[in-house]
């Protein structure tokens, strides 16, 4: 039996390609669906692919631990209304660990998938170190915080404090 085409809802950034291959292969086994080849090359710069992915309505999965230092990426997420999930922390190095974090938080990720962007949610393996489901502080056109972010625990996330 030939697998049917999958309805694509997620885009895995180049820094989690190993994870993407495992998730896609499991989709074939479990759901008998095959994802069409992605037309975005892994070498494409963030400010180019983020708008393309956002237009398609895909949720971005990444492991960019230095996103706070990349203004162009932050601006691309904000200006295009992108929705991003970041796997964060030392425990997300390597495909197996990334898969563990993704599966541990899968239900939560599925719940936020259809929320309106822009947002970036960060998930990790450890309780206090993870920024589970945190919506980062709103910022004005100059990048200044205009309101406090509130995470699942009701406290501001570390990058926005």
Image (tube, rainbow, N blue to C red):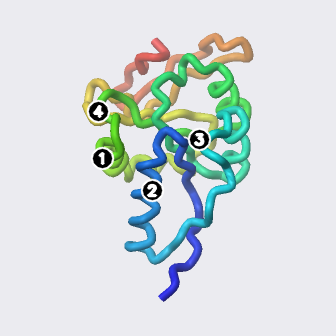
Q: State the image coordinates of residue 74 (x, y, percent, origin top left).
A: 63, 25
Residue ID for mark 4: 91
Residue identifier under label 3: 83
Say if 124 sits above or below 100 in the image: above
**CA distance separating discs 2 and 1:** 12 Å
Look at the numbered discs 3 and 4 and tell me whether their residues touch, using CB distance below 8 Å: no
Q: Earlier in the sequence, mark 2 or mark 4?
A: 2
Horizontal side of 103 relative to 76 (left or right) equals left
Name the residue that disc number 1 marks: 96
Q: Position of residue 135 (x, y in %)?
A: 50, 30
Work out whether mark 3 precedes mark 4 in sequence or the reverse, and give the earlier one: 3
Q: Residue at x 39, y 31 (%)?
A: 88
Q: Earlier in the sequence, mark 1 or mark 4?
A: 4
Q: Residue at x 33, y 29 (%)?
A: 130
Give the secondary structure at mark 1: helix
In the image, farthest residue toward the bottom: 1
- For the C terminus, the quadrant is top left
- Mark 2 highlights which residue? 21
Q: Secondary structure at mark 4?
A: helix
Q: Toward the viewer: 84 or 37? A: 37
Other residues around mark 4 within 10 Å, as few (<14) / some (14–19) / many (≥20): some
Local crowd size for mark 1, using a 10 Å CA cut-off: few (<14), some (14–19), many (≥20)? some
Q: Residues within 10 Å of mark 2 (few under 14, many from 20)?
A: few
Within 10 Å of the Cα at label 3, are there few (<14), some (14-19), or many (20+) other Cα atoms?
Answer: many
Whether 135 is drawn above or below 110: the answer is above
Q: Nearer the viewer, residue 55 or 34?
A: 34
């Amino acid at each position: 039996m030939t697998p049917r085409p999958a309805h694509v809802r997620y885009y895995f950034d180049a820094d989690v390609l190993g994870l993407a291959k495992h998730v896609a292969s499991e989709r074939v086994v479990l759901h008998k669906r095959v994802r069409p080849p992605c037309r975005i090359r892994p070498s494409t710069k963030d400010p180019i692919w983020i708008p393309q992915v956002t237009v398609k309505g895909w949720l971005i999965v990444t492991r960019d631990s230095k996103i706070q230092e990349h203004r162009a990426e932050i601006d691309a997420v904000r200006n295009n209304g992108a929705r991003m999930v970041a796997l964060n922390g030392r425990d997300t190095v390597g495909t197996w660990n990334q898969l563990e974090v993704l599966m541990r938080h899968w239900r939560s990720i599925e719940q936020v998938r259809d929320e309106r962007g822009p947002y970036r949610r960060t998930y990790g393996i450890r309780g206090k170190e993870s920024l589970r489901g945190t919506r980062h502080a709103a910022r004005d056109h100059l990048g200044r915080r205009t309101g406090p972010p509130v995470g699942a625990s009701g406290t501001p996330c570390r990058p926005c404090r």
